[in-house]
Amino acid sequence: MKRCIKLMFAIMLVAIMLVGCNTQKNTNKKNQTGGGKLSGTITAAGSTALQPLAEEAATEFMGNNPSVSITIQGGGSGTGVNQVTSGAVQIGNSDVPASEKLSDPALAKDLVETKVAGIGYSVIVNKEVTVTSLTLKQIQDIFSGTITNWKDVGGKDEKINVINRPAASGTRAAFEKTVMSGVKINDSVGTVQDSNGAVEQAINSTPGTISYLANSYLVGDKKNALTIVQIDGNDSSIDNITNGKYPFYSYEYMITKGDLKDPVKSYIDFVQGDDFSAKVEEMGYIPMSKMGNLK
């Protein structure tokens, strides 16, 4: 009799443990995918390179959490970093660490930087430009104003029209860091467009133009509307980036101030989580799982 009671007790204990484990798994899955009972509002601003992904993630997250409202704005990485620092938004989207966009880098100590994806960038030219590959040195010479005609880099006799990004742009910061490598951009030789979308339109409509875009703006039909220029013979594929053959890339950051709390925490977890990684790659970004040890 005693043996029977002990056996029944052991069976009940195992059953309780299994139910508990299953409940924890379900809770973790809900938190990861945004399926929990969350409510509140989230406002994010900043990087236009990250904006398409942030908007897509927001749409899916709000679909799973009808009581959460998310607003995503652009403005550039500098805007995002400064607005989250001042408390104007809850998330500052940026292509670079916060300290690179703050007038006082000491302010970054109160910020939390979460890497949510990698992003490759491409040098692009108008469809009528015949040049399809440039060396790093040639790109540096073009954007510094040393080379001003396409014939000097193997193209036809045509003026090079440079399109730059403003100082607040994280895409520009990534370009300066990985491509220009200390060579100063000469803003006087070209025009300035304030977003990836504006650059895309200007390149399409202006002969002889050259600029650079986040790969998130070069998916589907958009990829065929422009000429993507290889750098030293390599394109901006995920393989070339992760193998160290292509230099022009950065991480995408969602920057917050203070301790992460829901619904902001669950939204950021969703963006960088496994359930959303296929969409990350589909939209031209690099899932965190593929970034490895890249700096």
Image: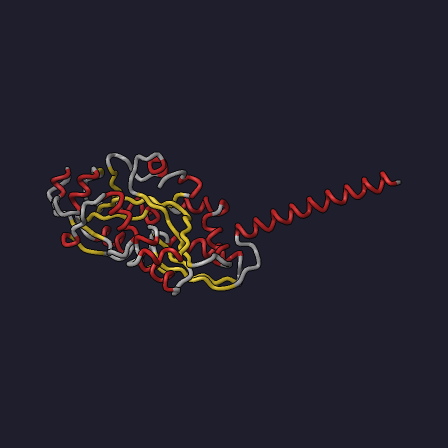
Q: Position of residue 295 (x, y in %)?
A: 35, 41
Q: Nearer the viewer, residue 14 or 138?
A: 14
Q: Quadrant of the N terminus?
A: top right
Judged left or right of residue 249, residue 159 is: left
Q: Position of residue 81 (x, y in %)?
A: 35, 58
Q: Position of residue 221 (x, y in %)?
A: 33, 47
Image color mode:
secondary structure
Residue 124 appears in view: yes
Q: Nearer the viewer, residue 139 or 16?
A: 16
Q: Is residue 265 above or below residue 285?
A: below
Q: Residue furthest right?
A: 1
Q: Is residue 95 above or below residue 152?
A: below
Q: Is residue 170 above or below residue 247?
A: below
Q: Position of residue 273 (x, y in %)?
A: 48, 47
The total number of labels drawn is 0
Residue 196 appears in view: no
Q: Nearer the viewer, residue 236 or 4?
A: 4
Residue at the spot 28% in from the left edge and 35% down from the top edge: 234
Residue at the spot 25% in from the left edge and 38% down from the top edge: 230
